[in-house]
Image (spheres, coloured by chain):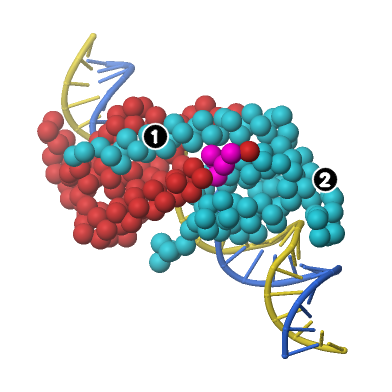
Chain colours: A cyan, B red, C blue, D yellow
Amino acid sequence: MTENKAAILKGTLDMLILRVVALGPIHGYAISQRIQQISKDYFQLQQGSLYPALHRLENRGWLAADWRATETGRDAKFYKLTAKGRKQLEAEMENWERMSQAVALILRTAQ
Amino acid sequence: MTENKAAILKGTLDMLILRVVALGPIHGYAISQRIQQISKDYFQLQQGSLYPALHRLENRGWLAADWRATETGRDAKFYKLTAKGRKQLEAEMENWERMSQAVALILRTAQ
DNA sequence: CTATACGCCTAGGAATTCTAGGTGTCAAGG
DNA sequence: CCTTGACACCTAGAATTCCTAGGCGTATAG
């Protein structure tokens, strides 16, 4: 039924966004393109997931935003990581490592 | 706030349960113990997550159950994998591999 | 006889992502 | 000129999943 689409695992999106923003100031629309590009088209982030997530991250003080013009002259909301956001990203990455190793333990348990 | 607990990533639980049941017929209570044990106490599966998940998997035809006695003489509901369940498990494991590799691409993007 | 482990269950809340809509600008092609 | 598509933002509500917090009953150890 729904096994065909590359949906994003719930709880992972925040980390992915923080990680991409950590590469340098970037606006929302470009974040989704970048995530898709870096993941070699595996992740296809929907706008209805993207923007609420960005507002959530901003409300929690992990991202800060300001409006600027893009290279092509359009207005866009550029995000950058706050100090809190950087700590959060580190924590989430560590947790991801431990979690995926725990999953690996279960998946690879021979018999 | 909630950064201390080893919550299970949403969407992962079904795969973990299917994988443990694939090791041989086992009842619900033992499944949660086994997941905790194999993951070296990383995952602590709550009963309020476990039993609804088991019913879900049974309804989808991935698990089949029957009541039997445990070694200690108690009644318990033993689950085993169906053919459909085995296919589902394989699909979910493949998907997990691809997904975690896509995450790794993003987390390890230099710069 | 009382606390703990075993073994099952449910209702409701919290959190996250997706579907499906909407707005407006600009550039390219017919 | 005019329509299509990419760009760039937004929201409401559905769907899903997991957790919290209860509940039931039996057996065993202290």
Left or right relative to B11: residue A19: right
Q: Quadrant of the C terminus of chain B?
A: top right
Q: Is residue A58 visible?
A: no
**Which is more toward the observer, B78 or A65?**
A65
Q: Which residue is mark 1?
A: A101
What x and y, as percent, mark residue B59?
Answer: 31, 59
Mark 1: which amino acid?
Gln
Left or right relative to C7: residue B73: left
Of labels 1 and 2, earlier in sequence is 2
What x and y, as percent, mark residue B44?
Answer: 39, 32
Q: Which residues are magenta?
A: B106-110
What x and y, as percent, mark residue B83?
Answer: 21, 59
What x and y, as percent, mark residue A33?
Answer: 63, 56
Q: Chain of mark 1?
A: A
Q: Secondary structure at mark 2?
A: strand
Q: Is residue A83 visible?
A: yes
What is the C-alpha distance between the residues marked 1 and 2?
Answer: 38 Å
Q: Secondary structure at mark 1?
A: helix
Name which residue lies at 61% across and 40% down.
Answer: A19
Q: Quadrant of the N terminus of chain B?
A: top right
Q: Which residue is mark 2?
A: A66
Tell me the quarter of the picture where residue A74 sits. bottom right
